[in-house]
Image: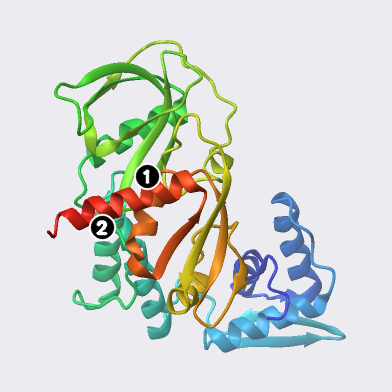
């Protein structure tokens, strides 16, 4: 089936035509296909050879007999068994395995709000097609289904979609008592297996973020929703993670990277701005254009002795201070 564009629509229409006991000619099938394509706003088929190729595809892939009758120069096509339909045909073992693995991959969302339907779909699939209940997936994604705060996900998601305000009771790790604010929610972002909500408080233009696992309670606020023109994909372009420190701007950060670690960060860049500005047999100097924040500090420290901050001085001093404090824990 060389022409794959709109192939599903073509096959469904041709399948219906082939069930007619009198048969359809190539031109009649093409007319039926084009009517359906035009109704869907799709481009019509212009070559009758496309229809013939589709008919051969059905015969070969569904292992069914298609009768070809000649009437002068015209040819008519029909199923030998008029009750046959590709929509009724059972899936092959290969197709079942592919579908099952796809469901297993989608299972990364299992346990998240709004995705309970996946568990139901998976159970129905296994029951209907008699696939083994103990089927093992060979693909795994990093997803923590036990993280706190996910019970608020649905309410936040709906409020963002409907542009409705929320009253949020929140307690960060350094707060003794929770504080309550009316928030216009804008964006949900996951980082390091935690979810964060970004929004504005009481119409302020300043963006505040809330870790979902620190939210105590969410209720509708019924206040005026404050719109934003921020494109959050651009908003996070110059940072690692989710925090944007006040008063800091994007700057060039230079780090020395050992030759062993260099191979790693070349295949998994720290950031899109990453570039090597000089190198030798021991390592390389890598430059990043970022706003230095806590998440970047954590990432640099995770590389241990294989990475050293060279510039700017204030960021180098910050990393040095944290390493010294850590060293004191082992005295």
Spot occupied by residue 310 in the image (x, y as percentages of width and height): 49, 57
What colour-coding does the image apply? rainbow
In-image side of 173 versus 239 (left or right): left
Q: How many marks?
A: 2
In-image side of 201 versus 118 (left or right): right
The residue singled out by tag 2 in the image is: 119
Spot occupied by residue 221 in the image (x, y as percentages of width and height): 33, 14
Above or below for 222 versus 67: above
Q: Nearer the viewer, mark 1 or mark 2?
A: 1
Mark 2, secondary structure of its residue: helix
For label 1, the crowd category at 10 Å Cα-Cα, with few meaning under 14, some 14 to 19 and many 20 or more, is some
Spot occupied by residue 171 in the image (x, y as percentages of width and height): 21, 27
Give the position of the C terminus as an image quadrant. Answer: bottom left
Q: Nearer the viewer, residue 181 or 310?
A: 310
What's the residue at 33%, 66% (across, down)? 304
- Tell me the number on the disc at residue 198: none
Image quarter of residue 250: top right
The residue singled out by tag 1 in the image is: 294
Q: Nearer the viewer, residue 218 or 289?
A: 289
Above or below for 108 versus 72: above
**Does residue 115 appear in this view?**
no
What's the residue at 50%, 17% (across, down)? 226
Above or below for 12 versus 311: below
Mark 1, secondary structure of its residue: helix
Q: Nearer the viewer, residue 99 or 307?
A: 307
Image quarter of residue 305: bottom left
For label 2, the crowd category at 10 Å Cα-Cα, with few meaning under 14, some 14 to 19 and many 20 or more, is some
Spot occupied by residue 52 in the image (x, y as percentages of width and height): 74, 81
What's the residue at 78%, 64% (across, down)? 31
What's the residue at 31%, 48% (across, down)? 321
Q: CA distance from mark 1 to mark 2?
A: 37 Å
């Amino acid at each position: 089936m060389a022409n794959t564009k709109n192939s599903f629509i073509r096959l469904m229409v041709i399948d219906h035509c082939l069930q007619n006991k009198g048969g359809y000619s190539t031109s009649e099938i093409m007319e039926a296909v084009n009517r359906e394509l035009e109704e869907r706003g799709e481009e019509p088929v212009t070559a009758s050879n496309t229809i013939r190729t589709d008919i051969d595809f059905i015969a070969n892939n569904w292992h069914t007999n298609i009768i070809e009758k000649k009437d002068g120069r015209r040819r008519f096509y029909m199923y030998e068994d008029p009750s046959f339909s590709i929509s009724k045909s059972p899936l092959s073992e290969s197709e079942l395995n592919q579908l099952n693995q796809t469901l297993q991959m989608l299972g990364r969302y299992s346990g998240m709000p709004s995705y309970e339907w996946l568990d139901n779909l998976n159970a129905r699939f296994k029951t209907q097609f008699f696939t083994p209940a103990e089927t093992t997936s060979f693909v795994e994604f990093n997803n923590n289904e036990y993280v706190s705060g996910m019970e608020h996900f649905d309410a936040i998601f709906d409020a963002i979609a409907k542009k409705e305000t929320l009253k949020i009771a929140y307690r960060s790790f350094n707060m003794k008592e929770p504080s309550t604010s009316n928030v216009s929610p804008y964006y949900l972002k996951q980082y390091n297996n935690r979810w964060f909500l970004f929004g504005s408080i009481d119409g302020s233009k300043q963006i505040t973020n809330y870790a979902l696992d620190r939210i105590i309670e969410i209720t509708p606020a019924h206040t005026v929703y404050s719109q934003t023109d921020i494109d959050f994909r651009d908003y996070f372009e110059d940072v690692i993670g989710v925090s944007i420190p006040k008063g800091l701007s994007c700057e060039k950060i230079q780090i020395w990277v050992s030759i062993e670690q260099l191979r790693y960060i070349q295949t998994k860049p720290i950031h899109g701005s990453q570039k090597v500005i000089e190198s030798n047999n021991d390592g390389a100097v890598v430059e990043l254009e970022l706003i230095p924040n806590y998440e970047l500090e954590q990432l640099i420290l995770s590389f241990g002795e294989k990475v050293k901050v060279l510039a700017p001085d204030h960021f180098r001093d910050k990393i040095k201070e944290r390493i010294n404090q850590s060293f004191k824990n082992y005295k």
